Image (cartoon, grey):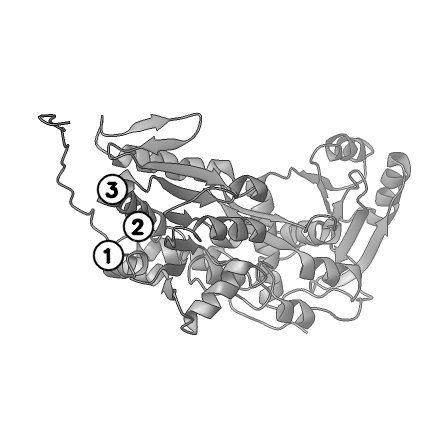
Amino acid sequence: MPGQITAVREALYTRPWLYPKQEAALFDPARFSCIEASTKSGKTVGAIVWLAEQAMTERAVTHPNYWWAAPIYPQADIAFRRMKAAFPQGMIEANLGKMTLSLPNGATIWFKSGENPDSLFGEDVWAVVIDEASRVKEESWHAIRTTLSATEGPARIIGNVRGRRNWAWRLCREAEKGAPGLAYHRITAYDAIQAGVLSAEEVEEARHLLPEAVFEELYMAQATETGANPFGGEHISACTGAMSADAPVMWGWDLAKSVDWTVGIALDARRRACRFMRFQRPWKETMDAIRQETGRVRAIVDSTGVGDPVVEALQRGGGMHVEGYHMTQSSKQQLMEGLAVAIQHRLILFPAGPIPQELEAFEYTYSQRGVSYSAPEGMHDDCVIALGLCNWGLNQGGGLGSPPSKRTNIF
């Protein structure tokens, strides 16, 4: 209307500091930038800056929807809280229930979960970050891609490497080949060290403590041949051989839970499997079998859940050297990483059959809480746990010293 005055708010914006590789990856001119990066290398911070800038442009007045998509809601919430804290107080409106940030220019940044692909269809989105892309369902990527079709909006596809059996790894390889509209960037832990984001000591400690496959993926952004398997197919094959006829010096027992198996594995003085038991029986018969097979040889038994009263009953029986091992995410991580070291250094031997089969199927996942180890859904890890317990018992001084620190083939 004639004489009407429209108030316009302006703000001076200065981009937060990003180191050169970080900025080049996130602000690549390509429509889709695929970024495989080390953990804690600054990929999330860079993506927050990129998406915020997309939403702060003048066009956002008529193009209001911007998304951050993560595999699950807790991961989306991390980015939501970090971006919320990054804006000056009073500049934005945050809806905690919907996980949205509303900007003064009319733009809204939505923080989404990829758990339900069907919930992602239908909207027109002007820019999107797909966080931890290797863990996002492929169907969710398909849905998100459709939201960018009408707008021809850009996307930043970021995350750690997690094997080769996922859409993000395949898309990165297409980008690496120079496919139209795609750019590829790789940021390693050593890039982050050079930029002052990570310390060299921290990375070297991780290299020392983590299995080789885990370190290569999480810190070097390099997929291993066996993907998310922490042991390595080549190493598992090298440790597969004939059963030893020597006497056992240590037993490891994983007790049946639900439809699982009770598994007992014994190692001899050279860390070669010399006894292997795998069965499903009532608890009384299970305890009788453990007593009979183990005798007076030291045994480490999984005491988690139903295992706790079983361990106590075995200890009360007298004459046995039984110790319980309570399984938490942290203690299981230590158990599996110790086993990975033994396998990768060729310090252990086991027969063909269920043991190497379970080892080959075993996987790790990485989250904010750390590294989590388990069998794929619908499969068993009883042999892996029993072998890990036996190896752990020997590492704690069960008649033998700790394994050598250098790679040694004992066969």
Q: Quarter holding the N terminus?
A: top left
Mark toward the viewer: 3 or 2: 3
Task: Using the numbered discs, state the Cα–Cα distance from disc 3 to disc 2 in whole angstroms.
Answer: 15 Å
Front residue of 310/23: it is 23
Please indicate whether residue 286 sits to the left or right of residue 185 in the image: right
The crowd level at tag 1 (other Cα within 10 Å; few <14, some 14-19, many 20+) is some
Mark toward the viewer: 1 or 2: 2
Where is residue 67? Give x, y as percent: 40, 42
How many numbered badges does the structure rendering display?
3
Asked whether disc 3 touches disc 1, contact meaning CB atoms under 8 Å apart, the reply is: no
> Which residue in the rendered view is the most extreme toward the front?
2
> Which residue in the rendered view is the most extreme toward the left?
3
Nearer the N terminus, badge 3 or badge 2? 2
The residue singled out by tag 1 in the image is: 19
- The label number, if any, that marks residue 139 in the structure image: none
Where is residue 360? Give x, y as percent: 68, 62
Please indicate whether residue 226 sits to the left or right of residue 160 in the image: right
Rendering quarter of residue 107: top left
